[in-house]
Each structure stands twice: as structure tokens, then as C-alpha cells.
Amino acid sequence: MTVVAAPGRRAHWGRRLLGGAALVALLVGAGVIRDTAPTDAEWQGPMEVRGEVAEELTGRNIRATVHGATVAAVATTEEWTGETPGRWIAVETSVEAVETEVGALLGTAELLIDGDRYGASVRPGSDSLEGLPLSLGVPTTGVLLFEVPESVLTEDAELRLAVGSDPRLDSMLVIPLTLRDLEVVDTYRFDRPSWGAAG
């Protein structure tokens, strides 16, 4: 004699299996979303605009061209001379505002080297582009100076430029620099920032 299960019991087990499969799919989907969703820092981080030396890069309210970079033991202008226990990296740059001059300062100028951030030096004062108000549609050309230890000069670096000191949720221009390929001089002489692109 053969006993056949009632159709109601088969349907009951089928619904349980279907519900279990749906739960597993939901958990897998939630795991994928969790692992691929941006972190809080990524949600609020700057929007990077990447380019190369000599390339004009444009963000929301900043446009810049890096013309070159030099390594030096001493940096000097007509009115200022700076020595450092490490080395200076001098970056010649043209920079301007794109949308408005209101609040447009070159407030973020840093070198990222092997995970460490080196801000542009304030020691040269107004002889440097650091913290300079940006003019709308008229580039200002000058130099940013960074004091770095000699030990990093074989590393790759990224120059990062942005309007304001807190570039979250705004544009950040990013230009790679191969430090070991830069020209090295004893003394780097430079002029104060001036209007117009580099000649």
C-alpha cells in the first residue's frame, strides 16, 4: 500500500523553500550593497579632476595648469630666502577662479607622498600662491613651495589643489609628480605671483 502526501503538505513545504531562498537572496543582496556602498568619507570627499603636468584642469570654481616642478635646498625671491633641513619642492602653477571670486582662495595646496600630506609653506608669505585670492577668468602664475624630507624624493607624489581649506563636496585638481625625475638645484629663485599665464 502506497501512502501519498496530501497536496496541502507539499504546498506548505514548497512555500517554506521559496521563502528560504528569497531570504538568502535578500541577505546576499544586502551584503553586496554594504560592501560596495560609499563610506561616509567617500560621500563627502572631494570630486577629483585628474590630469598631467602642462594640462589645463578645470573644477567647479578652479582652473589650474602646473608648468613644472623643481627640487632645491634653498628657495629665494628678492625679499625672502628660505632654507630647510630637508628639501623644497617648488611647483610653478597658473590658477584662476571659474564661476565667482567670492570666497575663491587657493586654500588647499598639498603634496600627497606615500600617504603623508605636505601643505604648501606659508613661510614665503605673499611671494607664494598659497592662500592667494583667485581672479575670475584671469590666471595668476606663481610658485607653491613644499618642505619635504630628503627621504621622500624617490617617491611618486600627487599635487592636490582646491578652493577653500575644506574641499569636501567640491572639486579637487590632482596632478601626479614623479619626484625622482625632477630637476635638482642648490638655489631656486622665483618671482612673486603675477597675472597672466606662464610665458
Image: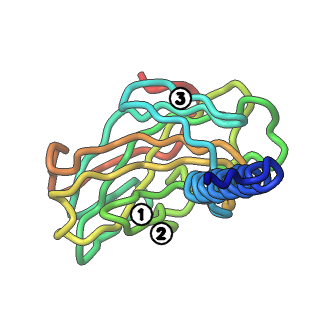
Residue placed most toward the observer, 126 or 79: 126
- Amino acid type shown at disc 1: Trp
10 Å crowding of disc 3: few (<14), some (14-19), many (20+):
many
Locate residue 42: give its quadrant.
bottom right
Above or below, 145 against 183 in this view is below
Residue placed most toward the observer, 14 or 111: 14
Q: Residue placed at 71% from the left, 34% from the top? A: 60
**Mark sitting on residue 57:** 3
Q: Please report contact status of discs 2 and 1: CB closer than 8 Å, yes or no.
A: yes
Q: Quadrant of the C terminus?
A: top left
Q: Residue placed at 39% from the left, 59% from the top? A: 112
State the image coordinates of residue 19 (x, y, percent, origin top left).
Answer: 74, 55
**Mark sitting on residue 80:** 1
Using residue 131 as the reference point, say whether residue 112 is left or right of it.
left
Residue 43 visible, this orientation: no
Secondary structure of the residue carrying tag 1 is: loop
Q: Earlier in the sequence, mark 3 or mark 1?
A: 3
Residue 62 visible, this orientation: yes
Residue placed most toward the observer, 130 or 37: 37
Using residue 172 as the reference point, say whether residue 143 is left or right of it.
left
Q: Tell me how far mark 2 sits from mark 3, CA to CA.
A: 27 Å
Using residue 40 as the reference point, say whether residue 161 is left or right of it.
left
Residue at mark 2: 123
Q: Tell me how far mark 2 sits from mark 1, CA to CA.
A: 9 Å
Locate residue 52: give its quadrant.
top left
Farthest front residue?
1
Looking at the rendered image, the disc whose residue lies closer to the viewer, 2 or 3, is 3
